């Protein structure tokens, strides 16, 4: 039923709305992935998988995803989310997610340290790091997301049967 992921796309977005769910939806819209159905998975990058641009998407697709999100109701508060992928070319990789009240620059630095630590704990060589990060200053209810979407094709192409 499930194919082994061969590619991953990284995106991030921010949104503002009247409720948490609407702000989350707007953040997904900003990231270009609002019309998908996510299957939340844990944070291992499959061996040989590569990072690719976001492919053509079809509404309602079921997509395995790792994501960080944060919501705030405090006007003027800065919120940020970051997601980092560490790749070892000879083995598997690790995906780390982080969100906080603060700047995207800080969230990115923290998620990079998290990736480094995860590789050290696993005794893996870190060959590449890819990061998506975003921040937002809240007006009423704000949300920020950083997402890794896992694809069954090395180019990130749609799964079989999509687009019928």
Image: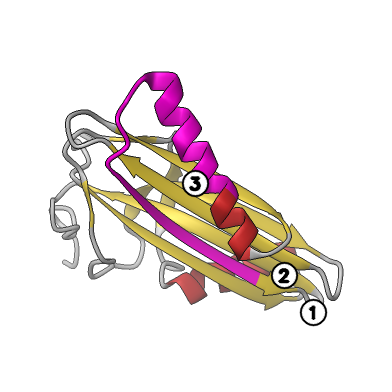
Mark 3–mark 2 CB contact (< 8 Å): no
Q: Quadrant of the N terminus?
A: top left
Where on the picture, by quarter, is residue 124?
A: top left
Q: Looking at the image, is mark 3 or mark 2 nearer the viewer? A: 3
Residue 79 can be seen in this image: yes
Q: Is residue 81 above or below residue 49?
A: below
| Secondary element type, mark 1 | loop
| Secondary element type, mark 3 | helix
Q: Is residue 128 magenta?
A: yes
Between residue 89 and residue 67, name the one nearer to us: 89
| Residue labelled with disc 3 | 112
Between residue 124 and residue 73, name the one nearer to us: 124
Alpha-carbon span between mark 1 and mark 2: 7 Å
Residue pictured at 68% horizontal, 56% vertical: 70
Residue 143 shown left or right of residue 112 in the figure: right
Residue 51 screen position, x and y as percent: 25, 54
Pointer 1: residues within 10 angstroms few (<14), some, or many (20+)?
A: some
Q: Is residue 81 magenta?
A: no
| Residue labelled with disc 2 | 142
Q: Is residue 104 above or below residue 147?
A: below
Residue 23 screen position, x and y as percent: 66, 69
Alpha-carbon span between mark 1 and mark 3: 29 Å
Mark 1–mark 2 CB contact (< 8 Å): yes
Find the magenta span and give its range. 110-135
| Secondary element type, mark 2 | strand
Residue pictured at 84% horizontal, 75% vertical: 76
Pointer 2: residues within 10 angstroms few (<14), some, or many (20+)?
A: many
In the image, which disc is placed on residue 139?
1
Residue 133 screen position, x and y as percent: 52, 62
Residue 60 screen position, x and y as percent: 36, 61
Residue 48 shown left or right of residue 24 in the figure: left
Residue 54 shown left or right of residue 47 in the figure: right
């Amino acid at each position: 039923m499930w194919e082994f992921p061969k590619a991953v796309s990284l995106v991030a977005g921010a949104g503002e709305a009247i409720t948490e769910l609407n702000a989350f939806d707007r953040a997904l819209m900003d990231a270009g992935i609002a019309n998908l159905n996510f299957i939340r998975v844990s944070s291992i990058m499959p061996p040989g998988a590569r990072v690719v641009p976001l492919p053509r998407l079809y509404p309602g697709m079921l997509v395995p995803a790792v994501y960080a999100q944060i919501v705030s109701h405090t006007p003027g508060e800065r919120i940020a989310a970051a997601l980092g992928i560490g790749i070892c070319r000879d083995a598997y990789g690790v995906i780390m997610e982080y969100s906080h009240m603060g700047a995207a620059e800080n969230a990115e630095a923290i998620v990079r340290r998290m990736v480094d630590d995860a590789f050290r704990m696993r005794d893996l060589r870190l060959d590449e790091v890819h990061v998506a990060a975003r921040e937002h200053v809240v007006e009423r209810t704000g949300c920020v997301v950083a997402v890794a979407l896992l694809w069954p094709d090395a180019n990130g192409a749609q799964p079989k049967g999509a687009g019928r």
